[in-house]
C-alpha cells in the first residue's frame, strides 16, 4: 500500500546536537527527564562483521515500564543516546498515562548503541584500535540485548530517529517476524550516497587529515583543527535557514550562536567517537530486501530535512517495495525543525496512532 503527502516549499532544517541526530531534544532541551531504569548488558568475546573482536562489549540501556508488558524498542541517531527520548518533547508526549506509548502498558527499551553514550566506544581507551562496527553489528547487539538479557520475545513496535530510523528498516529485514509494526523517522531506505555521503566523508576526512589526530592516538583532546572543521560541516548540513534567521536575526546574534555552539561541542565531542559514528553507516543499504519486511511500516520524514530532502523522491519510490509500507512527508510549519523534527513527537504522533491501530491484533 502506498500513500505519501507531497509538500512544496523551501527546504529548511535545524541545527542538531551532534551530527545528524540531536543529543539535545529539540522538543524540550534541559527540561524534566522522564524516570527510567538504567543497566548494562555485557557480551563476552563479541565478533564484529569486520572480523574484529572485543573481549567485552558493553551495551548500556534505559527502560521505562514493566518487563511483563508488550515491548517497544526506540533507537537514537548518530551521536545521540537513549537519554534524548526521556525529555518532555518526546517522553512527555508519548509515555504518560493515556498517551500512545503509555509506560504503564508498555515496556520501553532505549539502548545506547555501540560507540555511543555509555556503551563501549573508542574513547574508552582503545581509540582507533576499537573494532570498526557498522549498522549490522549495532542491530545484532540490540537484538541480543532484548532476547538474551531482557527476555523480550516479541516487539509491539520498532521505531527510531535518523540512524535509529535506518536501523528500523534493517530490523524489519533481519527479524521480520519479531515485531508488529515499524516506524522509521527521518531516514531513507537506500545506501547513503550523494550529498549525505559527501558530507559524512568531509567530516571524517577533516579528522583523519589533522596531523594532531595522530592515527587516533592524539595527546590533547581533541585535535582542534580537524574536529572544528567536522563540526562546522555538520552544523551546516543540519542547518535551518528560516529558523536560524528568526532566532539569530542580527550579525552579532548569529556570531554568538556559532561561538557558543563550537565551545560547547568541542568540550563534549571526542574525535575518534565521532569518526567511528559516521563511518558505521558505510555498509547501510536496505534497498534490495525491502520486500522481505512483513510488519506494517510507516515512514515519516519532514519536508525541511536537508539530510533526507524530499526533492530526491527516494521515499516515494522505495516505499512501493514494502508490502505493507506507507510514507508521510510532513509539511513545513512553524513547529518543524528540519531533521530534528524526528524528536518532536507532537508533530507526528497522530501517524503513530494510525500505525498502532493498523497493526493491533
Image: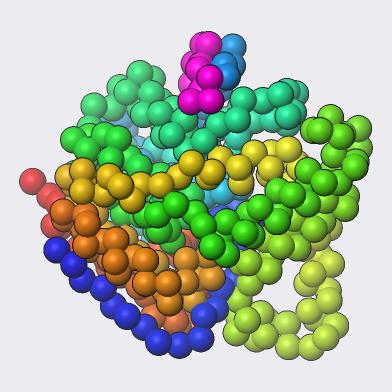
Q: Magenta stretch mostly in which secondary structure?
A: strand
Left or right of 202 in this view: 254: right
Query: Can residue 247 be seen from the camera position used here?
Result: yes
Q: Quadrant of residue 301?
A: bottom left
Left or right of 145 in this view: 283: right
> Residues in magenta?
40-51
Quadrant containing the N terminus in the rendered view: bottom left
Q: Quadrant of residue 188?
A: bottom left
Q: Nearer the viewer, residue 2 or 57?
A: 2
Total tally of numbered discs in the picture: 0
Q: How is the image coloured?
A: rainbow
In the rendered image, residue 120, in percent from the top left (x then y), is placed at: 61, 27
Query: Can residue 71 be seen from the camera position used here?
Result: no
Q: Nearer the viewer, residue 333 or 1?
A: 1
In the rendered image, residue 341, in percent from the top left (x then y), is placed at: 47, 67
Residue depicted at 66% across the width and 80% down the height: 244
Q: Quadrant of residue 99?
A: bottom left
In the rendered image, residue 79, in percent from the top left (x then y), is placed at: 61, 47
Q: Nearer the viewer, residue 188 or 331?
A: 188
In this rendering, is residue 281 above or below 49?
A: below
Residue depicted at 67% across the width and 85% down the height: 245
| 211 part of magenta stretch | no
In this rendering, is residue 176 above or below 335?
A: above
In this rendering, is residue 320 above or below 361?
A: below
| 45 part of magenta stretch | yes
In the rendered image, residue 350, in percent from the top left (x then y), is placed at: 27, 68
Residue depicted at 49% across the width and 54% down the height: 192
Residue depicted at 73% across the width and 38% down the height: 272
Amino acid at each position: 500500500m502506498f500513500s505519501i503527502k507531497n509538500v512544496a516549499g523551501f527546504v529548511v532544517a535545524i541545527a542538531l546536537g551532534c551530527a545528524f541526530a540531536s543529543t539535545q531534544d529539540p522538543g524540550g532541551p534541559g527540561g524534566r527527564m522522564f524516570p527510567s531504569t538504567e543497566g548494562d548488558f555485557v557480551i563476552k568475546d563479541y565478533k564484529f562483521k569486520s572480523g574484529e573482536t572485543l573481549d567485552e562489549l558493553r551495551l548500556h540501556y534505559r527502560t521505562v515500564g514493566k518487563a511483563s508488558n508488550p515491548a517497544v524498542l526506540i533507537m537514537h541517531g548518530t551521536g545521540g543516546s537513549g537519554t534524548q527520548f526521556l525529555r518532555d518533547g518526546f517522553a512527555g508526549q508519548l509515555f504518560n498515562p493515556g498517551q500512545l506509548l503509555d509506560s504503564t502498558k508498555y515496556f520501553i527499551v532505549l539502548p545506547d548503541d555501540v560507540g555511543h553514550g555509555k556503551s563501549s566506544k573508542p574513547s574508552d581507551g582503545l581509540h582507533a584500535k576499537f573494532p570498526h562496527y557498522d549498522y549490522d553489528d549495532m542491530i545484532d547487539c540490540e537484538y541480543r540485548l532484548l532476547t538474551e538479557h531482557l527476555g523480550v520475545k516479541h516487539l509491539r513496535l520498532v521505531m527510531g530517529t535518523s540512524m535509529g530510523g535506518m536501523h528500523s528498516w534493517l530490523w524489519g529485514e533481519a527479524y521480520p517476524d519479531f515485531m508488529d509494526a515499524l516506524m522509521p523517522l527521518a531516514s531513507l531506505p537506500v545506501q547513503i550516497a550523494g550529498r549525505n555521503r559527501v558530507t559524512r566523508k568531509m567530516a571524517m576526512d577533516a579528522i583523519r587529515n589533522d596531523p594532531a589526530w595522530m592515527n587516533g592516538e592524539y595527546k590533547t583532546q581533541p585535535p582542534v583543527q580537524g574536529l572544528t572543521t567536522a563540526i562546522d560541516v555538520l552544523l551546516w548540513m543540519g542547518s535551518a535557514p528560516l529558523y536560524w534567521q528568526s532566532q539569530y536575526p542580527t550579525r552579532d546574534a548569529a556570531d554568538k550562536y556559532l561561538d557558543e555552539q563550537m565551545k560547547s561541542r568541542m568540550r563534549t565531542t571526542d574525535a575518534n567517537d565521532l569518526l567511528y559514528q559516521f563511518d558505521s553507516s558505510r555498509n547501510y543499504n536496505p534497498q534490495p530486501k525491502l520486500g522481505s519486511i512483513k510488519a506494517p511500516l510507516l515512514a515519516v520524514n519532514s519536508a525541511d530535512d536537508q539530510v533526507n530532502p524530499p526533492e530526491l523522491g527516494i521515499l516515494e519510490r522505495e516505499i512501493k517495495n514494502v508490502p505493507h509500507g506507507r510514507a508521510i512527508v510532513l509539511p513545513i510549519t512553524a513547529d518543524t525543525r528540519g531533521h530534528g523534527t524526528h524528536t518532536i513527537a507532537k508533530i507526528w504522533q497522530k501517524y503513530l496512532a494510525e500505525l498502532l491501530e493498523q497493526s493491533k491484533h
